[in-house]
Amino acid sequence: MAMGGLLIRQHGDNSNASYVEFLPMGGQSRGFALGEIYQLSLFDIVQRYIHSGIIHIVPHGLDHILFVIGLLAFSRSGHHLLLQISLFTVAHTLTLAGASLGLITLSPALVEPLIALSIAYIGVENLLRSSPQITPQFTLMRGGVVFAFGLLHGLGFASVLADFGLPDTAFLASLISFNIGVELGQLIVVIPLFVLFRYILAEPKYYKIIFQVPVSVLIALTGIYWALERVGMI
């Protein structure tokens, strides 16, 4: 029976109390003897936390995937997409670090519905702002919205890290590695879709009819459903 990820710690005499190792579902730890101090190497920590960050997005982070696809669905402009994803990355890095250090504390009961609403908002805004004209004023406004929502999503990432912890002896390395994994997971989703839009759905009218409108409707409805579900209304 699948049990999901596992968290391994050492307890007892002659054990390393700060040792922690997260194993994703199907993962395998290195062998170690009970009662003997064992510590992962820096390479092992970086490798495992990058992998954990990736699988948190693909395949387990559907809410974050929908948000990033919503950013992509706004326009086919590579410059505008890069700006939005950069702002999103900076924002969620800040709150991920702050929450992991204990500087920011918000209940998942509040954060998770707000993340769902951020997804719904992006879908709705894509439908209302489907015009190809992107003014500097709107770019600034959209950037502020994406940055604010990135702060929320960072708190969501932090709750994942809190579930399996960060090793005291390599806190910064594991935090950075997890964030790198998250970014790689986002790129796995964004790059193929962006190439599809640039070279296959090259005509703006086809892009809007085939992708932008139906996907934005789906994202908006999914976000609303998740928000209602996460507050216990359905």
Image: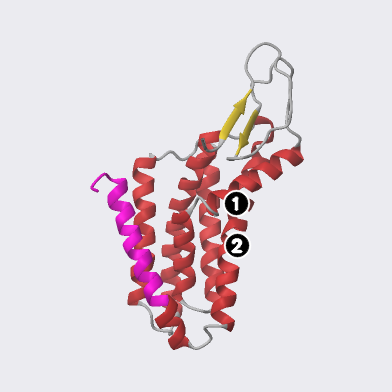
Pointer 1 residue: 54
Q: CA distance from mark 2 to mark 1?
A: 9 Å
Residue lying at the far front of the rendered structure: 1
Q: Is residue 196 toward the left or the right of residue 209 in the image? A: right
Question: Which colour scheme appears in the figure?
Answer: secondary structure
Residue 233 part of the magenta segment: yes
* Residue numbers of the magenta segment: 212-234
- Classified by dominant secondary structure, the portion drawn in magenta counts as helix
N-terminal-most mark, 2 or 1:
1
Please provide percent x and percent y for residue 227: 31, 52
Which residue corresponds to the image point at 70% horizontal and 17% vertical from the top-left?
34
Which numbered disc covers residue 83? none
Which residue corresponds to the image point at 62% horizontal and 17% vertical from the top-left?
11
Residue 66 part of the magenta segment: no
Does residue 61 appear anywhere in the picture?
Answer: yes
**SS at mark 1?**
helix
**SS at mark 2?**
helix
Please provide percent x and percent y for residue 115: 39, 53
- The residue carrying pointer 2 sits among few (fewer than 14), some (14 to 19) or many (20 or more) residues within 10 Å by Cα, namely some
Please provide percent x and percent y for residue 14: 71, 13
Q: Amino acid at mark 2?
A: Ile
Which residue corresponds to the image point at 35% horizontal and 60% vertical from the top-left?
222
Pointer 2 residue: 188
For the image, the number of numbered tags is 2
Please provide percent x and percent y for residue 162: 51, 36
- The residue carrying pointer 1 sits among few (fewer than 14), some (14 to 19) or many (20 or more) residues within 10 Å by Cα, namely many
Q: Amino acid at mark 1?
A: Ile
Give whichever of 207, 125 is nearer the camera. Answer: 207
Q: Mark 2–mark 1 contact, CB under 8 Å?
A: yes
